[in-house]
Amino acid sequence: MRAPSVPPRGFIGIRSMSSVAYYMVFPYLGLFFSEQFTTTNAWKIGIIVGVAVFFTRSGAIVMLAPIQRWGGKGVLMAAYIVGAMCLLAIDWFLFPFFIEWLIAAAILGIAFAAGTLSMKTWLANAVVDALLPRAYAALNWAANFGAFFGPLVGGWLIIGRSRLLIMCAAGSLLITVALAAFMPHSSDGPHVADSQRPSPSMTGFPRRLPVRFVLFLLAGSLTWFAYAQLFIVFPTYIHGHLSERFVGLLFAVNALGVIGLQRVVAHYVQGRGSLTAGPPWGLLIASQCLLGAGLMSLNLTPIWGAYGAITGIVLFTGAEMIWSPYYDVLVVTLRESLTTSGAFAYSGLFWGLAESLGAGTGLAVMSVPQGPSPMILGGLGALGAAGVLGILGRRSMAHPFVPPHNNEEA
């Protein structure tokens, strides 16, 4: 099988356009739904946004069997078609009942989850293990290329033109489907050796998950709890202090930083660890400390203004370029007996729960008088992730790191 050093151009295009759709809508969901409910129902907005964010990751768990049967390409195309239809339904019908918003949010989240799982599994099957760090770094680069445009467009359209925003996001998903349609079938599907090993995650829940994988899921959950405070909560948290357009520019700075430096950072990180010597635990721990410091700076934005926001986004970007692509690598290398699609689905389940909990909690505590700051809660979550990664690193030193063999099922 061909083993490219970076994803084929089709993967980069697919990831970029799906990312445009995601970041065009999700950072502004709180503001969008606030137009549908009164300010006294802030808890409803938190629940709806939390449900949508949760299913963007956890919804992948229900797509394991379809991916195994139809392959990543078919599931990806179907998922993003459903996602576009769901967005258009939200735009056209403006559901009057709370339960209808919950259902729409869940369907939208599952569509994004299925598309992301299909894409990552598809890519893992096309790249040899030794090149996974660079491949997922390139995918992260593509995601941020799309994330650069999404928040900018969203920030311009959310105020007064929110319906046009939803239609633009749906159009981006349909472009994603068109790009996937031109991808060759030969790069899709599992490895030839798939049938030579059991796949408990495809037929049901395994009796137990690997201990290292569980610890990594915990660290990732704390990271995604923190992550939600910036990309989901911060636009609402800072409303009235900074304009929505300035927030969109902040997200663009984050994306541009990753676009310009991701490959350089990935090369450096890969030089500090390998699939045989083990991950660069020190750098991963440092990235969580940077993430925590960034969120603490964002917490000071009501006092420091733009200076606090810019400092926070710079620190956050530096952290993201380390942990984001390498977390995907660790999902593959720490899975042991799990299949690649199963490992990504389980990580999505736990991390989706953590991110939705972070989004829902962050939006809810803002309505509590004298309540805790969501940015501080996120910073504490990042520091907790650093602690868990430290424990995982010590366990790996005591027990040598043995990655899955290259001929195992993906």
Image (cartoon, rainbow, N blue to C red):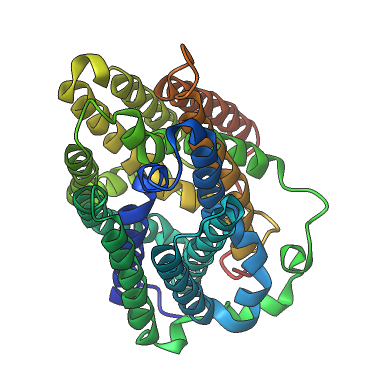
Query: Residue 197 at x, y = what percent?
Result: 74, 71
The quadrant of the rendering that contains the C terminus is: bottom right
Task: Give the residue displayed 18% in from the left and 50% down from the top.
Answer: 156
Residue found 23% across the figure and 27% down from its top: 309
What's the residue at 24%, 56% (across, down)? Answer: 161
Observer-nearest of 134 and 300: 300
Question: Between 239 and 148, which is closer to the camera in this rendering?
Answer: 239
Left or right of residue 343: residue 50: left
Total numbered labels placed on residues in the image? 0
**Percent position of residue 132, x then y:** 43, 59
Which residue occupies the extreme right position in the image?
207
> Can residue 274 be seen here?
yes
Quarter where residue 150 is shown: bottom left
Q: Residue at x 51, y 66 (%)?
A: 111
Q: Is 85 situated above or below 337?
A: below
Q: Position of residue 288 (x, y in %)?
A: 42, 29
Can residue 5 be seen here?
A: no
Occupied quadrant, residue 291: top left
Q: Position of residue 386 (x, y in %)?
A: 49, 26
* Relative height, residue 344 to residue 378 (above, below): below
Whether 27 is drawn above or below 88: the answer is above
Front residue of 308/100: it is 100
Left or right of 120 in this view: 167: left
* 16 relative to 407 in the view: left or right: left
